[in-house]
Amino acid sequence: MPRGQYHVYVIELDDRVWNSAKFRRCNPEYVMGKPLVYVGMTGLDPDTRFDKHKAGIQANSFVTDYGLHLMPQLYEHLNPMPYDVAKKLEVELAIELQAKGYAVWQG
């Protein structure tokens, strides 16, 4: 299978995102002290995609408002991959992180 050009990525969010009722509702099993994160996928380099989020370009508002930095230790070993694999892995990674107690927003 070809490696592809798509990437999954994880962005740590500022603790202030927990003030969002919408974010809290989606994370009822959050373990206080664990990271609050956004999980996404992209055809771009994750650094470039993060910069676009922060600039408000095709951005998730939680990342624009609360994004701190990428967490490559959680995804770097997975990339790159074909589109269909990245689409599936984005969801799986979000579920895995939530199971570990992280608060996750998946885009």
Image (cartoon, rainbow, N blue to C red):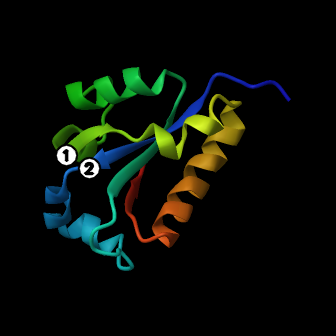
Disc 1 residue type? Tyr
Q: Residue furthest bottom?
A: 29
Residue 77 percent location from the top left of the image: 62, 37
Residue 43 percent location from the top left of the image: 54, 24
Q: Which dot marks residue 58?
A: none
Q: Quadrant of the N terminus?
A: top right
Q: Residues within 10 Å of mark 2 (few under 14, many from 20)?
A: many
Looking at the rendering, which quadrant does residue 29 occupy? bottom left
Disc 2 residue type? Leu
Examine the rendered structure and indicate whether residue 62 appears above or below residue 55: below
Q: Secondary structure at mark 1?
A: helix
Examine the rendered structure and indicate whether residue 59 appears above or below residue 15: above
User: How many numbered marks appear?
Assistant: 2
Question: Residue at coordinates 39% horizontally, 60% vertically from top-left?
Answer: 104
Ranked by sequence position, the earlier of labels 2 and 1 is 2
Question: Residue at coordinates 62% horizontally, 43% vertically from top-left?
Answer: 87
Residue 21 percent location from the top left of the image: 19, 70
Q: Residues within 10 Å of mark 1 (few under 14, many from 20)?
A: many
Q: CA distance from mark 2 to mark 1?
A: 5 Å
| Relative to 107, 64 lies left or right | left
| Relative to 17, 33 lies left or right | right
The residue that label 1 is drawn on is 66
| Relative to 63, 47 lies left or right | right
Residues under numbered marks 2 and 1 in contact, where contact means CB atoms less than 8 Å apart: yes
Question: Residue at coordinates 16% horizontally, 43% vertically from top-left?
Answer: 65
Examine the rendered structure and indicate whether residue 73 appears above or below residue 37: above
The residue that label 2 is drawn on is 13
